[in-house]
Amino acid sequence: AQTVTQSQPEMSVQEAETVTLSCTYDTSESDYYLFWYKQPPSRQMILVIRQEAYKQQNATENRFSVNFQKAAKSFSLKISDSQLGDAAMYFCAYRSAEYGNKLVFGAGTILRVKS
Amino acid sequence: DAGVIQSPRHEVTEMGQEVTLRCKPISGHNSLFWYRQTMMRGLELLIYFNNNVPIDDSGMPEDRFSAKMPNASFSTLKIQPSEPRDSAVYFCASSFSAYQETQYFGPGTRLLVL
């Protein structure tokens, strides 16, 4: 079974600075998708960014980018120019491209942004 | 465009009572998912439907839980009888198809069973 590990329970960043959240996963599959979701205090789950495993190019969405290392099974999220609104719980998630449609989530990382 | 709609947003009930959570997926989406979030277990999939048919219910914790999708625009998750350990946030999510990679989440229902 696939597992997703987020080793940083909590991170802090100064406003306007850059922060990187770590995620590793375990799978024997070659084709899959990876996601980062943001959960602010409202509890809404918001998609931040997604990466297809067959793509070598790292996904980017405005201030959010990933460092996808397939061989190392690593999928980190970099937030540039951090803003107060980025403060939230961030979840890394895995989905197989072949077997079912279940999202497997990591435990989450709380990101605090200091002004 | 309306996102995934869930009701109620908050529910407080007493142990032994029946609880029904409701979800309206994004129009045009054919797959619907129910997740539960707790401090102890994090986010876990309970069940998902494709074209109104349950595909994987292996995450449903026990017989007290049941889910239905009578049509493409409505689903329910029922707990009967409810227990304090069912207290959690329940999310509904939908995607365009079973194999479309992105699932869009509703705002969740916070359930407290006393």
Image (cartoon, coloured by chain):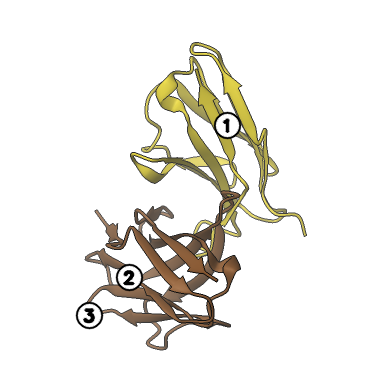
Query: SS at mark 2?
Result: loop
Instruction: Tell me the residue that label 2 is attached to.
Output: A22
Residue in the image at 38% along x and 45% along y: B42
Residue A11 in sight here: yes
Q: Amino acid at mark 1?
A: Lys
Asked if residue A96 lies left or right of residue B71, the reply is left
Disc 3, SS: loop
Question: Within 10 Å of the Cα at label 2, are there few (<14), some (14-19), or many (20+) other Cα atoms?
Answer: some
| In the depicted structure, whether residue B40 falls above or below residue B97 | above
- Disc number at residue B68? 1
The chain coloured yellow in the image: B
Label 3, label 2: how many angstroms apart (C-alpha)?
15 Å
For badge 3, the amino acid type reads: Ala
Q: Is residue B87 above or below residue B18?
A: below
Residue A71 disc label: 3
Report the Cα–Cα distance between label 1 and label 3. Answer: 40 Å
Please report, as a chain letter, where disc 1 is located: B
Residue A12: x, y in percent? 41, 68
